[in-house]
Amino acid sequence: MVNALQYFLVTILSYYTKGERPLADTAYGPLQGVHMTTRNGRLFSAFLGVPYAAPPVGPLRFQKPQPAIRWSGVRNASLEGNYCIQANYFFPNIDSVIVGDEDCLFLNVYTPTLYPSKLLPVMFYIHGGGFRVNSDSVRLHGPEFLLDKDIVLVVINYRLAAFGFLSTENSVVPGNMGLKDQTFAMKWVQENIINFGGDPDKVTVFGNSAGASCVHLHMMSPLSKGLFKQAISQSGSALSAFAIIGPGSSLALTKRLAANVKCTTQNTQAMVDCLRTVPQLTIQTEHEKILNSRYDDNVLFRPVKESPSSADAFMTTYPFEQRTNVPWMTGINRDEGAFKLALILLRNRLAFVDMEFDKFGPQTMNFDDTSSMPVNVSQQIRNYYFGTKSINSETTDGLIKMYTDSWFLSGTEQSIQQHDSTLFYYMFDHRGEHSFTSYFGQTANLGVSHCDELIYLFTMINLFPPNLNETDRKVSELMVDLWTNFAIYGNPTPVPISDNPQGPGQGTFVWESTNYTNPKYLHIQTNKLTMEEKLYSDRVNFWKSLKIRDKLHYKNNS
């Protein structure tokens, strides 16, 4: 932690030692930012803590976002805005169980030049975190790698957990406030990014995990149409089980939360009126208590299908009923489920998982409220991954594959089958010096975990040292090239590259675009790039055979 803190302080100090601080105008008033330096020594401008909407507090709690309030004078954009209120998973420098604030609709803008000869492509990042944790913080999503390229980067906060995804499943609180925040931030980009050197007609929206699911949902939502040109979903889609909630579940969770804070549950309007008066810390604390009372504490409030009659609805049909037609890059990491195994080991719950699998399985894989036969499905899953064996330290590979497939692979593959535009598909298969499993206490190599690709796109000084070893740096430079090339050219390899990430940049290798009929994928390994097909096809076909969403079909068709 000492090295990361020193790095952060040195970076902050360097902001003020490189000439006059940068100025940029917005529709809400001028900003004065700071200078930062990229990995390769390039000076760029950072504008931190920029409000893109009014504080969603008081009567605006649980409402759709409202326009930001214009400020007088020049706003200091050298300091980050509040994190959205959340459980403290990612801020070891803060000694508190709950961090952040309800007033959190801020974004950060990073640009290599305010006055380019030609407007620069924009990359708009939506963080992951199960719709309940994470933020736009420079300590979690540092821009020093990506800003070596000629792009403008925008990283946003959006409301989380109950504040962002609570729903009464009627017109009182239709839900999806966090998604509507994201759309509102995209509109801010359309209105203002030209003042930061960015091209509003060339926006690539990208995200990881729950953020990747949000990206995919924006590809479907009428509210987001025309606000971006192309998209990248890293380890998640709108069809990921963690991104879908069954009918009635959001209202049931809202009533449980209301009852816990002594609000009425008999009338939804009265219930919400009461919830708006409850201190934010109380709501967040009760949310965590409900979460921790479950067999698995992965996610509660999620994106919800709204009524077609809802004003400004984000989503009125389930995502598996829609097709997408926006150029898209998407993929998974080889061992996504390793992070879930790491959490199970950290909490010493292997024996519990083995004994309680029929109850644990449906909740941990998020089909307890979407399948009409969750116990039966859970038994099929156990038999497929473990056979007659116990779930113990000798069979943990089965858990990694189970979570990889249920949370990420199956939804991604189904989403590809519903995609009609340009597609670039990948599997990230480089295990570097650092991994998210180590952040959750596991020193053993559990594989290429969920979120591990982020280590090569962003600095993350709250979690890992900022400097990569030589092998990891080469992989990082490749990833940055692929991602920014897609944003700039619509093609991650507009010029052929080496098929060895550790080798020279030039070569004959091209990442081929593909389609849903027989999707090929780029296999990204430490020393090798290859185009392959039929990614874990047996496992994909197994998940296609399961009745994990039949209640949604039934409800939707009734």
Image: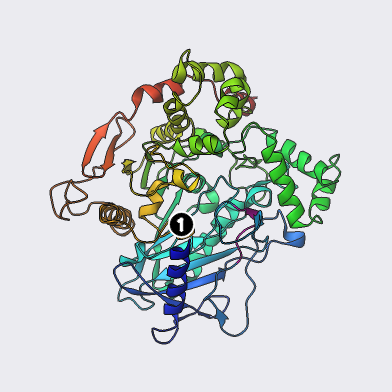
Magenta residues, dominant SS class: loop
Occupied quadrant, residue 76: bottom right
Query: Disc 1 residue type?
Result: Tyr
Between 185 and 435, the residue placed more toward the observer is: 435
Please state the horizontal and vertical placement of residue 93, each as a whole percent of the image: 56, 61
**On screen, residue 248 above or below 488:** above
Asked if residue 167 can be seen in this view, the reply is no
The residue at 50%/33% (across/down) is: 320
Spot the residue most to the left: 507
Q: Is residue 196 magenta?
A: no
Q: Is residue 84 magenta?
A: yes
Left or right: where 135 falls relative to 331: right
How many numbered marks are there?
Answer: 1
The residue at 13%/51% (across/down) is: 507
Please state the horizontal and vertical placement of residue 25, each as a whole percent of the image: 50, 79
Left or right: where 130 falls relative to 429: right
- The segment highlighted magenta reads 82-88
Quarter containing the C terminus: top right
**On screen, residue 246 above or below 159:** above
Please state the horizontal and vertical placement of residue 432, each as a whole percent of the image: 33, 47
Spot the residue most to the top: 388
**On screen, residue 17 above or below 137:** below
Label 1, residues with CA under 10 Å away: few <14, some 14-19, many ≥20: many
Say which residue label 1 marks.
Answer: 125
Between 434 and 269, the residue placed more toward the observer is: 434
Q: Secondary structure at mark 1?
A: strand
**On screen, residue 466 above or below 395:** below
Occupied quadrant, residue 483: bottom left
Please state the horizontal and vertical placement of residue 437, each as a whole percent of the image: 45, 43
